[in-house]
Amino acid sequence: MSRWLKCVAVILTLSLALGACSRMGLAYRNLDVIIPWTLSDYLDMNGEQKGWFNERLKEHLSWHCTTQLPGYLDWLDRLQTMVETNQVTDAALQTRTQEAKQAIAQTAREITPSAIELLQGLDDKQVAEMNDAFAKDQRKRQQEYLQPPLDQQIKERGERMQKRLNDWLGPLSPTQQQRIVAWSNALGDQNTQWIANRVHWQKQFSAAVAQRQSPEFPQRIETLLVNRESLWTPEYRKAYANTEAQARSLFVDLMAESTPTQRERLLKKIEGVRKDFNDLKCLKAVKQS
């Protein structure tokens, strides 16, 4: 799973621009920040596979930078205009969210053939190690997000959100802080459905890789990487819809309560992301051509 999916717990609509790192230029060197593909986290590749992977990574980065990033800059323009004109509404956020999802899907579709080729070349030992890595990931997340009592989960979720928003908006007012508490409470035991769905996806992925030489394998992997929503559990589908709605409502309310100083800080942050993108050599080459 990628950092993009983690951003659902932040502000989904800002995931594309305001993701896990504030210096996108540095993060862009690692493709898994941009696309939902972190197979290298779970695979112990041999020298030949690493060489092949790095070459493909360069090709995908070049494609992404030259064909996708210009659209991201337009997306940032629209986001910036929303803040500047005080038009941060639920409808506008839904539109920005849908645009971000389409961008993710387009990139996932582009890299899927490489993922298929890599997976088909794995030996049984590598597959076993991948499954062990999945199990380790599951244990770690269950310990971190499910073992604490529900009230502690809710409290920690609110604290994580407040920390992120402090970075983007600056110090929050008591009213804004209380709104974050209400948001976290509204998500309830969302962690349970999130982890369960993650395990569900990993099990299906492992089952597909176990049959990696079958004729159906490419289609199964494409579904797992590009159309993953079609494989969600019914419980998570419902929880995710609630998560999105609560995130939009939170951001609308926070911006309605925001001060000029907070909005100025947010606009500067967005501009910082824009600058990081614009400073990439590959994007400069596109603009000069």
Image (cartoon, rainbow, N blue to C red):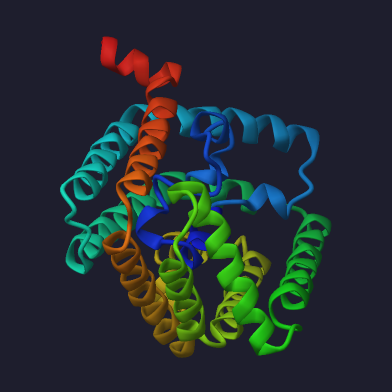
Quick one: 275 or 31, which is closer to the camera?
Answer: 275
Quarter of the image where the C terminus is located: top left
Check the image and report above or below for 56 versus 114: above
- Using residue 73 as the reference point, say whether residue 200 is left or right of it: right
Residue 48 showing in the rendered view: yes
Residue 207, quarter of picture: bottom right
Residue drawn at x 37%, y 72% is: 244
Residue under the point 36% across and 31% down: 274
Q: Position of residue 25 (x, y in %)?
A: 51, 29
Could you tell me which residue is drawn at 55 percent across and 51 percent down? 37
Q: Residue at x 77, y 70 (%)?
A: 140
Residue 39: percent from left, percent from top: 64, 52
Q: Residue furthest top?
A: 288
Is residue 64 at all visible to an observer of this figure?
no
Quarter where residue 96 is shown: bottom left
Looking at the image, residue 19 lies above or below residue 253: above
Residue 282 horizontal/vertical position (percent): 41, 19
